[in-house]
Image (cartoon, coloured by chain):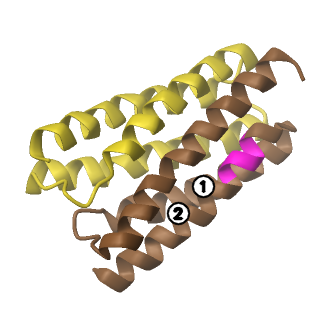
Chain colours: A yellow, B brown
Amino acid sequence: MDSVTFVGICAGILTTSSFLPQVIKIHRTKKTSDLSLAMFVVLAIGISLWIIYGILLGSLPILLANSVVFVLCIYLIVAKIRYG
Amino acid sequence: MDSVTFVGICAGILTTSSFLPQVIKIHRTKKTSDLSLAMFVVLAIGISLWIIYGILLGSLPILLANSVVFVLCIYLIVAKIRYG
């Protein structure tokens, strides 16, 4: 693995992992009132485009990281709709 | 501009824009209790690495998008520390 891909993978692991504390917090508290639904809806659409960009660019870090974030983002959208 | 860069720029605009509703919401309500501080701290570190990755890869969309998100992310961290 070249050093550029290594930096990308580290970046991907961190930005992907960052969504976990928020998912865990909401799963535990069932409270989402301070979260912006618009944020996570726009984010999910944007992440879908990053996935396409990653495929077109042949960038594995972009593809993998955004795929996981997309799933976590959908969880946050569903939680926000459910808990208000 | 080639089509790959165009998709990347659209992705960047959307994921960057997505942070704005959250920033506006917090600026208005001054409430951050449902937000995870760990999320935005880990995100800020990850985004720093994406910026480095964008520079190394020569990807303008990755570089620009993550630079703006980084600033918004710092705002959210400061707000979370301030409002609790």
Relative to A38, A64 lies left or right? right
What's drawn in magenta, residue-wise? B62-66
Expressed as whole percent of the image width and height from the top left, the position of residue B10 reads 67, 30
List the single residue furthest toward the front. Answer: B28
Toward which corner of the image does residue A31 lie, by quadrant?
Answer: bottom left
Chain label for disc 2: B
Q: Which mark is residue B69?
A: 1
**Contact between labelled residues 2 and 1, with CB atoms less than 8 Å apart:** yes
Chain label for disc 1: B
Expressed as whole percent of the image width and height from the top left, the position of residue B67 reads 70, 56
Q: Please name the residue shown 41% across and 57% down the image.
A: B22
Name the one closer to the observer, A42 or A56.
Answer: A42
What's the CA distance linking mark 1 and mark 2? 6 Å
Q: Please name the residue shown 36% across and 71% down the image.
A: B28
Name the one closer to the observer, B72 or B54.
Answer: B72
Toward which corner of the image does residue A40 lie, by quadrant?
Answer: top left
Expressed as whole percent of the image width and height from the top left, the position of residue B72 reads 56, 63
Predominant secondary structure, magenta span: helix
Q: What is the three-letter code of the residue carrying label 2? A: Cys
Which secondary structure, mark 1?
A: helix
Q: What is the three-letter code of the residue carrying label 1? A: Val
**Is B28 located above or below residue B60 in the figure?**
below
Expressed as whole percent of the image width and height from the top left, the position of residue A75 reads 25, 34
Relative to A11, A20 lies left or right? left
Q: Quadrant of the C terminus of chain B?
A: bottom left
Name the one closer to the observer, A76 or A60.
Answer: A76
Q: Which mark is residue B10?
A: none
Q: Which mark is residue B73?
A: 2
